[in-house]
Amino acid sequence: MSVAKKKANPPKSITRVTHRVSDSKERTGTVRTSDQFRLHLPEGMRDKLAELAKANGHSLNSEIIHRLTRSLEREGVQKKLSDHLKIQGDRLARVEEEIASLVERLRR
């Protein structure tokens, strides 16, 4: 009986890891090469995130990515809303100026 030797996997880069993941991770953006970095969290935050990850059926990493993604999306939505409100405010100011001009003409 011969014992088959396992092929050694080539070492992975310290800063990038390529891996294939499930559909749920595709939504979080971890399908492709991912950057890795050390993250220092305030005391207790890791435990809280781990609890939330478990409750949501995510790994801790996926939970963090999911929450960061949502935060960045909200930031983009807020910027669009802010820009839209500025445009609407400018329009309102022009309408108010036109109304004031019409009122002035009627008084003459």
Image (spheres, rainbow, N blue to C red):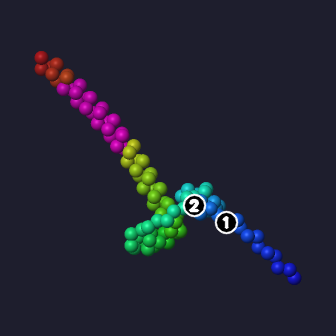
Is residue 55 visible to us here? no
Please check the rendered image and state whether residue 30 is part of the magenta-colored stretch, yes or no: no
Q: Main secondary structure of the magenta part?
A: helix
Percent position (x, y) of residue 75? Answer: 40, 50
Q: Please, what is the three-letter code of the amino acid marked with disc 1?
A: Pro
If the image is split into quadrants, where does the N terminus sit? bottom right
Residue 11: mark: 1
Vertical relation: 94 (above or below) 8: above
Q: Extreme left residue here?
A: 108
Write the residue at 55% across / 56% down.
29
Q: Is residue 36 above or below residue 82?
A: below
Helix, strand or loop at disc 1?
Answer: loop
Report, in whole angstroms, how far the alpha carbon at label 2 lies from the one at label 1: 12 Å
Q: Position of residue 9 (x, y in %)?
A: 71, 67
The residue furthest top is 108
Q: Is residue 31 above or below residue 101?
A: below
Q: Is residue 59 left or right of residue 19?
A: left
Q: Nearer the viewer, residue 86 or 14?
A: 14
Q: Is residue 41 visible?
A: yes
Give the label on residue 15, or none. 2
Stretch of the chain drawn in magenta: 81-100
Q: Residue at x 49, y 65 (%)?
A: 38
On the image, which quarter does residue 100 sit in? top left
Instruction: Give, as a three-letter code, the residue at label 2.
Output: Thr
Q: Let me know if residue 99 is in the magenta part.
A: yes
- Where residue 20 sits, quadrant-wise, is bottom right
Give x and y (percent) for residue 85: 32, 40
